[in-house]
Image (cartoon, grey):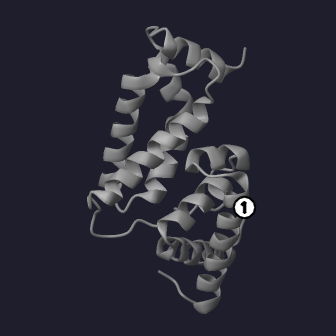
Amino acid sequence: MDVDRGLVLALRRKEPGALDGVYRVYRERIWRLLARLAWSRAEAEDLFQETWLAVARHGHKLREDSNLGVWLYTIARNKHRNSLRSGARGVGRRLGFERLPIAPSIAPDEAADINRELGRVAAALARLPDAHREVLLLCVGERLPRAEVARILGISEEALRKRLSRARAALDVLLDSNPAEVP
C-alpha cells in the first residue's frame, strides 16, 4: 500500500496521528504553493492554517480512492481564491519565487547574474493574473502531473493545456518587455 493510500485510510478512520502524518508529508509543498500565491507572508500563514483546519475537519469524509495530494492542493487553492473574493489581500504582492541559494562553487559574478534573473522571473510572475500564476506554479513550480493539476483547478486536461500555454506566453511577454528589470 502506498503512503498516500495509507494516510487516506487513517484519516477516514480518524486514527490518532493520521493528520500528523499527512502534515509531515505535505506541509512543505502546501506552504510553498500558498507562499507563492498569497500577497504577503501573513496571508500565506493564515491560508496555511485554514487549509490544515479544513483537512482536520473533513479528512474523515475522503473516499478510499481519493488522491490525497490533489485534495490538499485543491483545499489550499480554494482557501486562496476565497481570500481573493473576500478582499483579504495584504498591501504588497509577494513574489512567486524566492531567490534560491547559489552553490558555493559558482563564481560570485555568476551567482549575481543567476539571482538577478530569478528576481526578474519572480517579478514577472507577480504581475501575472492569478489564474496564470497558479497554473505555472502547479505545473512548473510543483512539477505536478498535468492530470492532477487539471483536477485541482477543476478543468479538463485540454483546458489546462490551453491555460498553461497562455500563461507561458504571458510570462514570456513580461520577460521580453523588460529584459533588464530587476526588482
- For label 1, the residue is 161
Compared to 163, does 68 lie above or below? above
Q: Which x, y percent locates residue 49?
A: 34, 38
Compared to 166, does 134 lie above or below? above
Residue type of the residue flagged with mark 1: Arg
Give whichever of 173, 42 is nearer the camera: 173
Identify the image quadrant of residue 3. top right
Compared to 103, does 123 lie above or below? below
Q: Can residue 27 be seen from the camera position used here?
A: yes
Q: Which x, y percent locates residue 84?
A: 34, 59
Give whichever of 112, 92 is nearer the camera: 92
Say left or right for 168 vs 129: right
Q: How many numbered dots are placed on residues in this image?
A: 1
Q: Residue at x 49, y 16 (%)?
A: 11
Identify the image quadrant of residue 117. bottom right
Q: Residue at x 45, y 51 (%)?
A: 34
Q: Can residue 101 be seen from the camera position used here?
A: no
Q: Residue at x 73, y 58 (%)?
A: 158
Q: Which x, y percent locates residue 68?
A: 59, 29
Neighbour tally class for label 1: few under 14, some 14-19, many 20 plus, Cα within 10 Å: some
Which quadrant: the N terminus?
top right
Q: Which x, y percent locates residue 14?
A: 44, 10
- Dot 1: element: helix
